[in-house]
Image (spheres, helix red, strand yellow):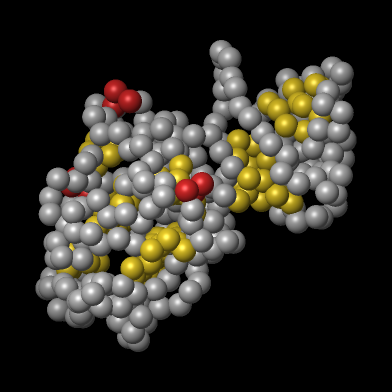
Amino acid sequence: MDALLSTGAIPAAATSYDIGYSVKMESDTPENLTRTPSSASNQKTWTWSGWVKVTEPSHDLGTMWAGGTGSGDGSINFRIDNGQLTVNTASTELRGTTARFRDPAAWYHFVLVMDTTQSTANDRVKIYVNGTQLTDFSGLNNPSQNADMGVNSAQLHAIGRRSNSNDRFFSGYMADVNFVDGSAKQPTDFGRTDDNGVWVPKAYAGSHGTNGFFLDFADAGDLGDDESGNGNDFTENNLSSIDQATDTPTNNFCTMNHNARTNGNIRTQEGGTFVTTDGGSGWCSMLGTMAVGAGKWYWEAKVWDNSDALTVYVGIAATNDPYVPHSQGGYYLGNVETTGSMGWYLSDGSNKNQAGS
């Protein structure tokens, strides 16, 4: 099944805590953040919390958080594969949640809690999404009691890639990332349910512990800056100021919808703000993540490279139109067959409406 979350922005009145910025990561570049603690701390108990928007849901092995470079339980990897959440080490694994989180319009709140001191095996690793604990996995192998895991070792830790190998990169946005060293926290420490039943952000008010950190991505020139007061800054790898975004859980932007495309010839990059083709032949198209029904609207589009002289249309489409997204030759935005649509034609700058003119 697909997990659902309101795809619109959380209304400003719904939360007293506004998240101003996020970081936009692209797996093709690849972009990520890394840090190696100067000394080890609590390797049994910790909590990672982050708001995540996955703009390429079919992307494999997108790592959100990882720590440690050793063998066995010496490294741990929290990733999303085709919408399924997985936590694994060489010997510990919560594989593949049966619920899938692949709505490219949604901001999900993910919380990963590790506490190997627990006597009950299933209490040693917990995953929460939007305040609800996930318990149904396609594979389950919990760590042994009191095991020291790779996170909080004096080894490489990473956001957006694996820590024990420079691969499995993440594509999408992250915002309001907290890591609490030495404490097993609850989702309610980072979020709450508002009066409309929507899970919304809440400012974390507790201590972060020795190797803990808080990344708010508010400094475009230093996206790895730790705001917890600990000074546990991360190094930016292939990231720059242009990767700071204002698309956040409290200001959700419309992007291109990887799930609403005609075929594999077209895909999104750069947080759903960039659409590219693989050069294959035939018509292809993609819709945005948000629909409009009334009022006035504004958006911008920039042609980055059209060296292949492609026929490009940008515009608005009726989603009940059987030809949109279209995969058959001749059915473009503004064509007579695409009822209710209007498009701008790149080649001559003309507008096209449903009458074909």
Q: Is residue 215 left or right of residue 271?
A: left
Q: Residue furthest front?
A: 221
Whether residue 186 sits left or right of residue 215 in the image: it is: left
Residue 64, percent from left and from top: 40, 61
Relative height, residue 41 to residue 208 (above, below): below
Is residue 128 in view from this perspective? no
**Horizontal and vertical percent position of residue 104:** 51, 44
User: What is the quadrant of residue 343 in the picture?
Assistant: top right
| Residue 144 in view, yes or no | yes
Residue 313 picture location, percent across and down: 77, 33
Relative side of 290 to 218, left or right = right
Q: Find residue 13 and report its horizontal and vertical position in percent.
A: 29, 23
Is 50 placed above or below 257 here?
below
Q: Residue at x 58, y 15 (%)?
A: 296
* Residue located at (36% from left, 46% from top): 219
Position of 151 relative to 179 (above/below): below
Along the viewing direction, whichever of 178 and 84 lies nearer the viewer? 178
Query: Which residue appears at 76% of the width and 46% of the height?
Result: 305
Residue ranking furthest to the top: 295
Q: How many marks?
A: 0
Residue at image x 32%, y 47%? 216
Q: Quadrant of the C terminus?
A: top right
Q: Nearer the viewer, residue 94 or 290?
A: 290
